C-alpha cells in the first residue's frame, strides 16, 4: 500500500485484489515508482497521449510486425492512463483541467487507433471499406466524448466529479449490470484485446466490431450517466 499525507486528506493506493481490469495490475507497480519522481499527472497524461498516437501510427503501416509494436505502445499508453489519476490523488494535484486533459487524451487516442487501423488494413487489403469502418468507430468515440463534455458541464456548477461519484448509485438489476460491465471493461482493457488479436493476426476484426461497438459504447455511456451509476 502506498500512502501520502497532506493537509486535507489521507490518500492511499492499494494493490488490486480483483482480476479486472487487468491494466490495474500493470499500473499499480508503475504508480509506486512514479509517485517518487518529480513528475506531474498532466505530464503523465501527455506521455500517455504520445504513446497512444504512436501506437496509431504503427497500426496505420499495415503489417504484422508494426501492428505488434503498435499494440505494445497502446498497452503502455493505457497503463499510464491509469497512473495519472492515481498520481493526482496521491500527490493532491487533482484539477478540473487535469480531468479535462485526460478525457481529451482518451478521445484522441481512441479515435486515432481506429482511424490508423482502418487505414493500415485498407493499405494491406486494397479495400476502402476498412477505412470507412475505422472512421465510423472514431465517430462513435467522438460522440461519447461529446456526451462526457455535456454531462461534466451540467454538474460543474453544483459539484465536482469526485463528489458526483461519491454520491452516485450502483447499477441495479441484471440489465443495469450488463450495461455497466460492457461499458467499464471494454474501455479499461481494450488495449489487451488489441494485443491478443494482433498475436493471432486478426486485428482487422476490430474494425466491423468497433464500428458497431463504438456506437453501443456511447449509448451505454448515455444510460450510465443518465441513471447516475458510480463511475
Image (tube, rainbow, N blue to C red):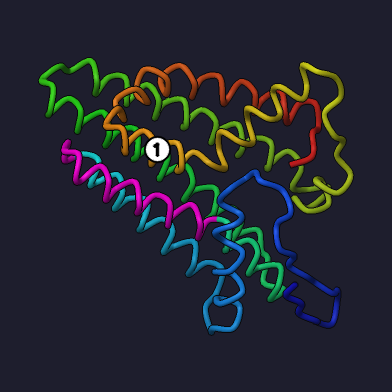
Q: Is-magenta flag for residue 68?
A: yes
Along the line of sight, the residue nearer the viewer: 37 or 154: 37
**198, above or below 54, in the image:** above
Q: Main secondary structure of the magenta part?
A: helix
Q: Provide residue 186's location: percent of width, then percent of height.
A: 56, 33
Left or right of 188, for residue 11: right
Tell me the quarter of the picture where residue 185 sits: top right
Left or right of 219, for residue 18: right
**Which residue appears at 58% of the width and 48% of the height?**
22
Q: Provide residue 158's location: percent of width, then percent of height.
A: 83, 47
**Which residue appears at 49% of the width and 46% of the height?**
106
Q: Provide residue 95's location: percent of width, then percent of height.
A: 66, 64
- Magenta residues span 61-81
Along the line of sight, the residue nearer the viewer: 79 or 229: 79
Quarter placement of the N terminus: bottom right
**205, above or below 119, in the image:** above
Q: Is-magenta flag for residue 78?
A: yes
Residue highlighted by disc 1 = 196
Amino acid at each position: 500500500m502506498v500512502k501520502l499525507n497532506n493537509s486535507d486528506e489521507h490518500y492511499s493506493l492499494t494493490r488490486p485484489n480483483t482480476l479486472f481490469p487487468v491494466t490495474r495490475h500493470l499500473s499499480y507497480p508503475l504508480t509506486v515508482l512514479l509517485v517518487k519522481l518529480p513528475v506531474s499527472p498532466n505530464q503523465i497524461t501527455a506521455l500517455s497521449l504520445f504513446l497512444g498516437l504512436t501506437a496509431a501510427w504503427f497500426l496505420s503501416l499495415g503489417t504484422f510486425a508494426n501492428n505488434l509494436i503498435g499494440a505494445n505502445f497502446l498497452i503502455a499508453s493505457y497503463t499510464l492512463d491509469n497512473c495519472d489519476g492515481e498520481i493526482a490523488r496521491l500527490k493532491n494535484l487533482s484539477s478540473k483541467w487535469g480531468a479535462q486533459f485526460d478525457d481529451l487524451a482518451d478521445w484522441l487516442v481512441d479515435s486515432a487507433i481506429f482511424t490508423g487501423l482502418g487505414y493500415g488494413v485498407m493499405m494491406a487489403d486494397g479495400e476502402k471499406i476498412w477505412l470507412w469502418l475505422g472512421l465510423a468507430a472514431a465517430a462513435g468515440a467522438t460522440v461519447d466524448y461529446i456526451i462526457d463534455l455535456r454531462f461534466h458541464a451540467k454538474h460543474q456548477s453544483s459539484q465536482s466529479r469526485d463528489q458526483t461519484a461519491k454520491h452516485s448509485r450502483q447499477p441495479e438489476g441484471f440489465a443495469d449490470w450488463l450495461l455497466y460491465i460492457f461499458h467499464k471493461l471494454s474501455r479499461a482493457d481494450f488495449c489487451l484485446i488489441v494485443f491478443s488479436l494482433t498475436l493471432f493476426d486478426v486485428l482487422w476484426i476490430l474494425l466491423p466490431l468497433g464500428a458497431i461497438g463504438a456506437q453501443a459504447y456511447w449509448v451505454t455511456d448515455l444510460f450510465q450517466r443518465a441513471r447516475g451509476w458510480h463511475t
